[in-house]
Image (spheres, rainbow, N blue to C red):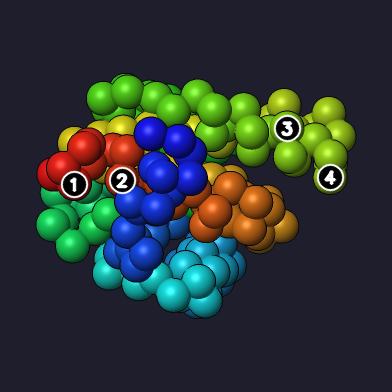
Amino acid sequence: MSLEQHKGCAPAKLRFAVITISDTRDAGTDRGGPLLVESVQGAGHAVVLREIVRDERAEIAAAVRRAVDCGDVDLVLCTGGTGIAPRDVTYDTLRGILDSEIPGFGELFRWLSFREIGAATILSRALGGLLGGKVVLALPGSPKALRLAMDEIVLKEAGHLVAQARGPRGA
């Protein structure tokens, strides 16, 4: 199949889970989660699960597993905890639970980010992978970085990613 044929088989409407990971944000101060929700909904998709969890390994793993186990969720978006500060454990936690990684996601995000912020992009540990047959993407908490990821990667490839993760029969 050609790329165009693959994309033609992708679902047009997707259902997302959005998980904010932060020790300092709550529903009133979270900027990343609402931006993701607005972006997803603005593209005609739905957000069917929304959580805010602390930057703690067990809480992150549990929230991502809940989202993946939810039959209504096609793709999981996490925001926050992808830096290199000692409290940023999202990357290490997800690497420990993912069935496989999608290395190109983080690579492409950092390449695009380099054009905007230069070498500081090395501080980002954006990550993509599969868990239980579903796509999980870990994004920074910065609204500017989230807009870049959503506009240039996620919304353009979400359907294709989900279709490929489901396999040839959409299972």
Please identify the quadrant where the N terminus is shown. top left
- Taking depth in this image into account, of 11 and 151 the one nearest to the observer is 11
Say which residue label 4 marks.
116
Q: Amino acid at mark 2?
A: Ala
The tag earlier along the polypeptide, 2 or 4, is: 4
- Taking depth in this image into account, of 5 and 170 the one nearest to the observer is 5
Query: SS class of the residue under badge 1?
Result: loop
Say which residue label 2 marks.
163
Label 2 CA crowd tier, 10 Å (few <14, some 14–19, many 20+): many
Disc 3, disc 1: CB below 8 Å?
no
The residue under the point 45% across, 36% down is: 2
Task: Tell us which disc is closer to us: 1 or 4.
Answer: 1
Q: Residue 48 occupies which quadrant of the picture?
A: bottom left
Disc 1, disc 2: CB below 8 Å?
yes
The tag earlier along the polypeptide, 3 or 1, is: 3
Residue 89 visible to an observer of this rendering: no
